[in-house]
Structure formats: structure tokens, C-alpha cells
Image (cartoon, grey):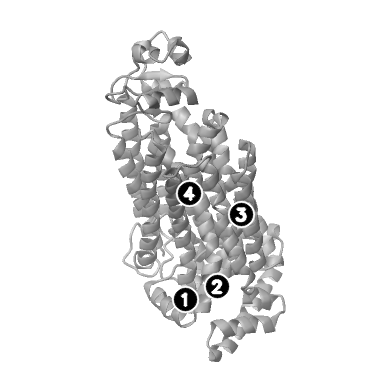
Amino acid sequence: MVEGGVVKAADKTEFTECWRVTWKTPYIMRLAFSAGIGGLLFGYDTGVISGALLYIKEDFEAVGRSTFYQELIVSTCVLGAIFGAAAGGFFNDSLGRRKTILIADFLFFLGAIVMAVAPHPWIIIVGRFLVGLGVGMASMTAPLYISEASPARIRGALVSTNGLLITGGQFMAYLINLAFTRVTLLATWRWMLGVAGLPALIQFVLMLSLPESPRWLYRANKVDEARAILARIYPADEVDNEINALKESVQNEKEMEDSIGTTTFSKVKGAFIDPVIRRGLYAGITVQVAQQFVGINTVMYYSPTIVQFAGFASNSVALALSLVTSGLNALGSIISMLFVDRYGRKRLMIISMLGIITCLVVLAVVFQQASVHAPAISQAESAHFGANSTCPSYLSNVNLHKWDCMSCLQAKCSFCSYPANKYHPGACLVSNKDLKGSCLEQKRVWYEEGCPSKIGFFAVILLGLYIISYSPGMGTAPWIVNSEIYPLRYRGVGGGIAAVANWTSNLIVSLTFLTLTEVLTVAGAFLLFAGISFLALVAIFFFVPETKGLQFEEVEKMLKTGFRPKLFSKNTKGAGSV
């Protein structure tokens, strides 16, 4: 069941049943796939900006010189998604799920076109905000539509495919980014961002031929239309039972609204007053905030840039290596589907957090060592390109012998490697296109983000291990916990509050990462995330109960009486609860 975009886990039996039912009734898969393109759009936009940013910096020098500009281009989409999710809740109730998805597609398509033709960075930011509005609407509406248009016995499996499509969209974005670097095109980034409009257009066309959610139609007193749709989803002998179940569910929902109010404010107020719901929110918000503050979206949004920090200067090489991390993320989602019901949500999250913390600490050490052993600056090599080409900060410094590649980059200049060996002392030059061209013409390597490093490849391996640690646990379990931790009458508002906490945390992390790398260095930024991850691990241990195998009523009873934290329990029903 999905409320407000929150997903309930599916087990292996449900996936087997899903294949059997959808093979017998292809119409169900058509509904799920068409709506699931929204997840693909979400994932594609998350991944595509990481590669496009490399080329936007080259075309707009103002963006290349300003980390704030870069952070704004990346994070504006997240800001739009926060507003889009809020607007999506209103449109879902007033217009229906299908029309909300159509609006999301229009906004996404419009945003993609605006970005593709943008003559100025601020226009890109406007386009990113429009895309974010579409992403926010689609991220909560697509799972809702799929869950309400799917047979109950395979609902979890079909909704889970939406999460898989998100990670699949990220992988596709990295693949397309890499493909565009292999062909000779003007304004590569425009193609990367513009092509995102195609899936939105395809979904728009497909959704025009699909019906509204039967649940929304029934609630809108369009009973005959709801029955007609259910007749295409269920066998004839099950339709009456489903109509009766729908009637009972909608009636219960209306009774809940009478008791807790229909306005958002009254629902939120009631959630925090009720001690049971408040304890559920402690758990739900904890895991959602932790999911973002372990730094995952610094990797997904800035992965190629991080690879360049590790010493891989080429855009195409950075994108190729980033493709590996995206593929591992998709693989982790599949692993989570297979094991989350066997080993439990809390156990997977704790194991995941231990792996994340380890990887972040080792990453910090690797980047620190890469910085310490950065190539020195040669006065002769710098003078080779002309007196006016040498970095002004280098020329004015009295301790020239202490300068290395990292000192050069921190001064907002660029490092041009020694031609025969990139690890030998090189030149510290003014960062501009002409000097970059001169450097490359002499068979040297131009570095703007990171320095040549013999241990840089270890950073890429650790990024892969970080993703493997994150994806099966912290990548999916927080959403599952939020689908199970709230009593039915507050499941929608509880999931919504936690989702807003997730998006807001995402915005903070994506808006500050590059600034943190300047203030704390890359090593310091990863060490900071490791420290926050440790605090999050402690919070998960004390505030989050195990909900595996528990009925909703049992979860509510556990929250009412309290629970005693346990790391791992042999009890298959609610490990960690009392």
C-alpha cells in the first residue's frame, strides 16, 4: 500500500505472483509501466546533471569560477521537488492521479527545453526548478497510481519496480552522458539535459490513453467508471469483492478525516500531539534525514566531479567511472528487494551504516594522502607559458617552494602537468580556455578539480564500495519503514512529513557540498559525513524499532508501550521490540 508516495516492501512470493498475473493480464503491466516512467524521469534527472555540470562549467566561465553557481544549478531541482510534492498532494486529491502525472510530464518537458536552449546560467536554474516541480509531483503520484491500479496481491512488487526504475534512470543518464562525450557535438550539455524531455513526452502520450485511478473515481462518486476499470484488472468473480473493499476503505478514510480534520495543518498538529504518532515520526524522520546526511546525493549529483577530485582530469573518463557507481546503485536496489523481508529493515540499515561510515573514513584518508603527495609547482614550467599566464597568487607568494598542485587549485588557478610524467612538478596557470588549449596541445594534462595521484583509483573503488553499502540498506529501507511505522489514520500525513524532511535534507546536502570541499577540503567533507553518519547510526539504534513481520496493529501497540533497542534479535516478528 502506498500513502503519499511511501512504499511497502514486496517479498519473493509476491514477485513470482506478479510475473504470473501480469503475463495473464498485460493491461496491468501497461498501467504500471506507463506510470513508472515517472520514476525513470526522477532517476534520469538525478544522474544527468552530474555529467552535464562538467560541460556547463566549460561553456560558462562564471559557473566554473563559482561553486555557489554549481550548487545552485544542482540543488534548484530539489527545491522545486519540495514544492512539487506539496502541490502534488493537492492536485492528487482535486484533479486525480492521472491528471497530476500529465501536469508533471508537461512541467518536466518544459523544463528540459528551457535548459537545452538556455543562453545564461540563470535560465538553466529556472529550467531546473521547473523540472524539480515535475519530479516532486511524479515521485509521490506514480507509486500512488500504481498501487491503486494494481491487484492487492502483487501491489508491493509493482510499486517496488518504481524504485528500480529510479535507479535505472540514474544508470541511463550516466550512459547517455558518456555517449554524448564520444560524439562531436556543440554544447554537449544541452543535448544531455534536453533529451530528458523525450521520456516525459512518451509518458504524457501513454497516460492520455489510460484511465484514472479506480480509488479516486470511487471517492469522487464515479462508481460505474471505477467498476469498469476494476473489471479490466481483476477476474470477473473478484470485481464485486474489490468494489466492497473499496467502499469500506473509502468510508474508513472519510471517518478518519472527520476525527482528525481535513486540512494539512490539523493533520500535522494531531500527529505531533498523539504520543504514538510522535514516536513513529521520531523513527520515520530519523531514517529519512539519515538517508541524505550520509552524503549519498553528493555522490549521485557530483560523482564525476568527485572522480576528478581523485585525479582523473578527463570528462569522459570521469563519466565512465561514475557509470560504475550508478550501476552498483541499481544492483543494490535489486538486492534490497530480495533480502529486506528476510533480514529485517533495522538490521539492513545498521549493517549499511557501518559500511558507509567505514568507506567515508577511508575515502577521507585517501583524499588526504592524495593532497599531501600532490605534484609540486615548477617556476620554470609556469614561466614556459609566459609571465602573464602564471597564476597571480603563486607569483605574489613568498614561499614558492611550498606550493604544490593543491595550493594552485585552492587559489582558483589550474595545474598543467609536466609533459613526460604527470607526477613531476608542473605549471600553475591562470584558469581560462586559451591556456587550457595551449596545455593540451603540448600533450600535457589540464587539472581544474583535482591533482594527479597514484592512489586516486582507490577513491573510485571506495565510491563503489560506498554505493554497495548504501543501496541495499539505507537506499530503500527508510521508505519501507515509513510505510509501516504509522497507524492507518495518519499514514499519509506521517509519510508526507518524513518525505519533506528527506527532500529538505537532500537540498541542504546538495547545496553545500562543493562549499564544504573548499572550506574543509574533500577529505574533510567526507570525514564530516562520516561523523554525521555515526550520530545517525546511534539514532537509528535507539529510535527505530524493527517492523519486519508485524501487522500494522502490532506496530501501533509497540509504539504505544515503547520498545527496547536491540541490535539483532532472533524474534522474526519485530526484532528489537518489546
Find residue 548 and report its horizontal and vertical position in percent. 41, 67
- Residue type at mark 4 is Gly
Question: Of the residues under marks 2 and 1, which one precedes in the sequence?
Answer: 2
The CA span between labels 1 and 3 is 29 Å
The CA span between labels 4 and 1 is 29 Å
Find residue 139 and report its horizontal and vertical position in percent. 56, 59
Local SS, label 1: helix
Question: Of the residues under marks 1 and 3, which one precedes in the sequence?
Answer: 3
What is the tally of numbered marks visible in this picture?
Answer: 4
Q: Nearer the viewer, mark 1 or mark 3?
A: 3
Residue 108's mark? 3
- Residue type at mark 2 is Leu
Rendered image quadrant of residue 384 = top left
- Mark 4 is surrounded, within 10 Å at the Cα level, by few (under 14), some (14 to 19) or many (20 or more) other residues, namely many
Question: Of the residues under marks 4 and 1, which one precedes in the sequence?
Answer: 4
Question: Of the residues under marks 3 and 2, which one precedes in the sequence?
Answer: 2
- Residue type at mark 1 is Ile
Q: Nearer the viewer, mark 2 or mark 1?
A: 2
* Quarter in which the C terminus is drawn: bottom left
Q: Are marks 1 and 3 in contact (CB under 8 Å)?
A: no
